[in-house]
């Protein structure tokens, strides 16, 4: 069965510092991978996605992620964090089940940014 | 009009009440989803509809009853809920096709449900 693991529940970084959020997935075929961000009281917004091709993908708000098949990972990075990046981040894998396409989410990583 | 709209944003109901959550998407997508988001838990997929047909019911209790009259509208009818059903209910849509889905989920802002 497909699954997504985000090992870090909380991460705190200082503004201007670099950021890496970890994501590991379990899926038998080539995965479709996503990172979403959720601000308090809001829905989820897509940051970036990987389907195929270049394993380093660029997203919105200066985020990027790298797909590493050998490690079953899709870690999210940002070179310099801004206070407005404080939110919860979700990694997801897309998979086709018996019917419609399904999206499996990790438990999320809550990011706190120190001024 | 935003892509996916959910109403109401907040709902408080007693255990004996009957209420409904509404979701509308203006993106022309053919698949719609209900997710439940509880504290400290992963997003739980509840139901999936594709072209108005239910294609996924993730062992959801019968006190939750979905309805999808067309590809743009999705409802979640609620009755005799329990306090543990209090959560943020998120609606999402995507474009699914027989050849594969290379799209992503577009989410609404959610309906925060509190069951007393």
Image (cartoon, coloured by chain):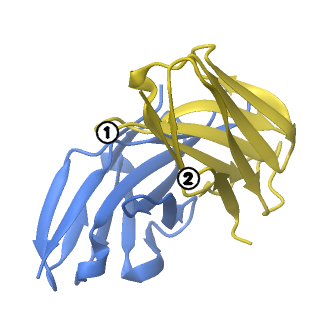
Which residue appears at 43% of the width and 32% of the height?
B86
Along the polypeptide, which appears first: circle 2 or circle 1?
Answer: 2
Label 1 marks which chain's residue? B
Chain colored yellow: B
Horizontal and vertical percent position of residue A9: 20, 47
- Name the spot of residue B40 as percent of width and height, x first: 28, 38
Answer with left or right where residue A105 lies relative to residue B71: left
Labelled pair 2, 1 in contact (Cβ < 8 Å): no
Instruction: Return the mark for residue B10.
Output: none
| Mark 2 belongs to chain | B
* Mark 2 surroundings: few (<14), some (14-19) or many (≥20) residues within 10 A: some
Q: Is residue B79 above or below residue B33?
A: above
User: Residue B22, located in which quarter of the rendered image?
Assistant: top right
Instruction: Please tell me which residue is depicted at 19% across the width and 49% down the height of the picture.
Output: A8
Give the numbered dot on residue B39: 1
Residue at the (58%, 58%) spot, across then down: A51
- The crowd level at tag 1 (other Cα within 10 Å; few <14, some 14-19, many 20+) is few
The answer to whether B23 is drawn above or below residue A88 in the figure is above
In this rendered view, identify the residue nearer to me: B60 or B110.
Answer: B110
Q: Position of residue A92 (x, y in %)?
A: 46, 48
Image spot of residue A64 (x, y percent): 38, 73
Residue B57's place in the image compared with A53, above or below, is: above
């Amino acid at each position: 069965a497909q699954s997504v693991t985000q090992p870090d529940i909380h991460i705190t970084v200082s503004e201007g510092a670099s950021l890496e959020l970890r994501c590991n997935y379990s899926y038998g075929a080539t995965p479709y991978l996503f990172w979403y961000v959720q601000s308090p009281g809001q829905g989820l917004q897509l940051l970036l996605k990987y389907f195929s091709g270049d394993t380093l993908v660029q997203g919105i708000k200066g985020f990027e992620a790298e797909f590493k098949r050998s490690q079953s990972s899709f870690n999210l990075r940002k070179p310099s964090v801004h206070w407005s990046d404080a939110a919860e981040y979700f990694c997801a894998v897309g998979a086709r089940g018996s019917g419609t396409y399904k999206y499996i989410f990790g438990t999320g990583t809550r990011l706190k940014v120190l001024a | 009009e935003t892509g996916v709209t959910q109403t109401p944003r907040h709902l408080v109901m007693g255990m004996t009440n009957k209420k409904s959550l509404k979701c509308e998407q203006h993106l022309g997508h053919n698949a719609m989803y209900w997710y439940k988001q509880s504290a400290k838990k992963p997003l739980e997929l509840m139901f999936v509809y594709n072209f108005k047909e239910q294609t996924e019911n993730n062992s959801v209790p019968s006190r939750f009853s979905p309805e999808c009259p067309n590809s743009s509208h999705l409802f979640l009818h609620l009755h005799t809920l329990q306090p543990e059903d209090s959560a943020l209910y998120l609606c999402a849509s995507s474009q699914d096709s027989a050849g594969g889905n290379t799209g992503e989920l577009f989410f609404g802002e959610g309906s925060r449900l509190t069951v007393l």
